[in-house]
Amino acid sequence: MLDTPPRASMFHRISTKLVVAVLAACVLPFVAFAFYMNEVIADRLTRHVVQQALMGLVKDLAGQIDRFVDERGKDLEQWAGSPVAISALEDYLWEKREAPTSGRTSGQSVDGLPPWNAETLERWRCGEFSLEFDESHPHRARATLEFDRYIDLKVIDIDGDGDPEKVYELLLLIAADGSLVTCNSAHADAPLKIDNLEFLFARNFADEPWFELAMQGESVRIDHHRSPYLFDIPEGDAARNYQLGFVSPVVDPRRRGDVKGVLFSLVSWSFVQKLVDGEVITDAFRGLVSEGEVPSPYAWIWDSDADTILGHPRPELYYKSVSKDVSLPQLTQAVLASESGWGLYPEYNFGGEDKNAAFKRCVPLEGGDEDPNNGWVIGVGIDNRDIYAIAEGLRALLLGGTGGVVVLSVLLTLFIAKRTTGPIGELQQSTRRVADGDLDVRTEIQSRDELGDLAHDFNRMTRKLKEQRQRIIKAEKDAAWREMARQIAHDIKNPLTPMSLSLDLLERARREHAEGSEEILVRTMDLIRRQVENLRKIAGDFYEFTGGRKPDPESIDLVELLQEVMHLHDAWAVELGVEVHLDGESITVTADLGKLRRVLINLVSNALQAMPEGGRLFVQSACHETDPGRVCLTIRDTGVGVSEDVAAHLFEPYFTTKSEGTGLGLAISKRVLEEMDGTIALDPAPDKGTIATVTLPLAYEPGPTDP
């Protein structure tokens, strides 16, 4: 009779456990998940992701501004090297030298034509002069045309509205004495007016600090400022009131690089302001807010002192102090304390909103050799309400749905528990009968759910068990024979390789009538004889692999055995172009000679196969460094090597990295060495190749007091 377990109490019943489990599965995860959303996702993960996005945005933005400024400097250096600028300066110098000696007054030029000045440039631009005048001022007229062309061609669509704007507002070519040689005739928006031209031609630029540096051969970049050289700036864009200046020396390459003058340009600050006002900043965070809403992030630019606002979506903050006027000194301190010039601001409140923001220093305008913490400070900030918007919505949804989920789960669990426990009890009884050996048992559960499928599978299982018993026994026997066949083939293959190569060497020596053919014949016959004996021993020793023959340990001269093994592979090594180095002191170990010989042959064969293009093979034996009772043998090749992942599986049966072979060689070697109280390891070499390390016990040498 089957054993009958005691009747379960109400608490131990499956139906009760299901109800409790569902309650725990619904309530606890919802509460834990809500806490997780609040503490981890909202407060840590979401903020961390947003902060990393801020740092990425501010880095990209600073890079765009650096590239914009760098391109303007390169533009000016390129234009300063044009022949037009050199020729215009030489034209000016020639007229300056010729005027006093020719009797001409300052109001005259060549052939009585007016000199090149503001009035002349204005009249020439309006077409009042003939071709004769153009020929008397060819270089300055051409330079002015080139400057106008530069301004027309250098356009950028900063805000991406499809309407590119002219980058440069003013180009001035200044002689070495500080006088204006010529300039562009057209402003970025309209022609330069006569009063603006008169101001420029009358000004002595030699007093400007940047002029002296440029005349010394340096390119200069002038920071954010209001330029006195530009009149009638259009209203409506506060950033147009400010400019960036770029100065480049005009060098005459024909006269050892003498500085002939200076090329000066002005670029509107509005381009830099539009870079920080780009939609890419808000687009990066649109996923944080609901569709149709505009996220809060925006960017700004501070001066290199990290305290003066140069660019901001609110123009009224231009040139305001961050620490004083805006009352956020902690932000200035964070930038000044940063050694890398890149990082996160401490969380702060501005305009009644808590915010997170990141900053990045630009490259200093004066060049790349100065302190990297002297460049503009680019900042990007976002309101915390945007950071936590998704988490807040999800938290409310979780809390609202928890109650309904709990009620529905309990009712559904009670119904399922009642339908489940009955068939389970019947299956339990049938399972006990199978456990007692009754494979004819059948269950009559007819439900169409998983329990019905389980009952059907149970009945099919009992029918198959009897059939599978004999199949399993037969499969185990077949697998054992297959494994033995693979192992025999693998062990026989290794001796055949050096035999084949030695025969090839003998045949080539006889064919070519090489000296020492008889000696090669004797050596080859001896090798074949020993290998045939070795194959005969392999065939007999597979009885040992099944556990029939135990190792027959004896004292073996390890160096002598290594020399024998390496000699077997001489012909193969020569053919591959492998240089063999055998080093070691005479050491006697305790091992089975035949088993150890096959292990070494296998390792050397693997090393040679890893060097198809030639290389070096190092074989060394020495006493173990940490265990005085053992010897350490290393076989190192310079072949293709193995990765650490592959090395971890090399000793598994049937695992191989070769295109041929059974993958049993290393597994057999490991088993054989362990039977002889030895170890084996394969590791990637530090530089190239693989190192095989074998340890064996030293042979016991009786002392004078031993019997």
Image: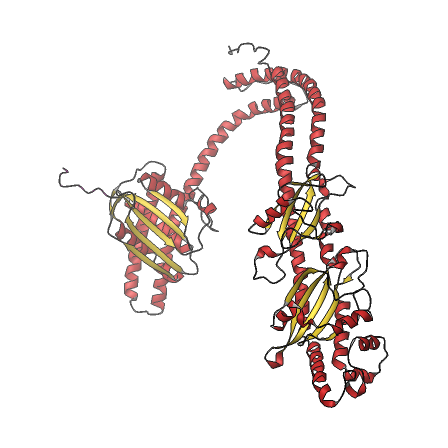
Give the side of residue 529 with respect to residue 321, left or right: left
Whether 700 is among the magenta residues is yes
* Count of all numbered marks drawn on residues in the image: 0
Can residue 535 be seen in this snapshot? no
Q: Position of residue 54 (x, y in %)?
A: 65, 46
Q: How is the image coloured?
A: secondary structure
Q: Is the magenta stretch mostly helix, strand or loop?
A: loop
Whether 606 is among the magenta residues is no
Q: Position of residue 34 (x, y in %)?
A: 65, 29
Could you tell me which residue is drawn at 30 percent across and 69 percent down? 515
Q: Residue furthest bottom?
A: 102
Can residue 396 be seen in this snapshot? yes
Could you tell me which residue is drawn at 74 percent across and 80 percent down? 139
Q: In this view, does 290 lie above or below 249?
A: above
Viewer-proximal residue among 424 and 118: 118
Q: Position of residue 561 (x, y in %)?
A: 28, 51
Q: Position of residue 326 (x, y in %)?
A: 69, 45
Could you tell me which residue is drawn at 82 percent across and 77 percent down? 124
Q: What stretch is highlighted in magenta?
A: 699-707
Viewer-proximal residue among 565 and 125: 125
Q: In which quarter of the image is residue 297?
A: top right
Q: Is residue 156 above or below residue 302?
A: below
Figure quadrant of the C terminus? top left
Q: Quadrant of residue 499?
A: bottom left
Q: Is residue 697 above or below residue 40?
A: below
Viewer-proximal residue among 235 and 354: 235
Q: Quadrant of residue 344?
A: top right
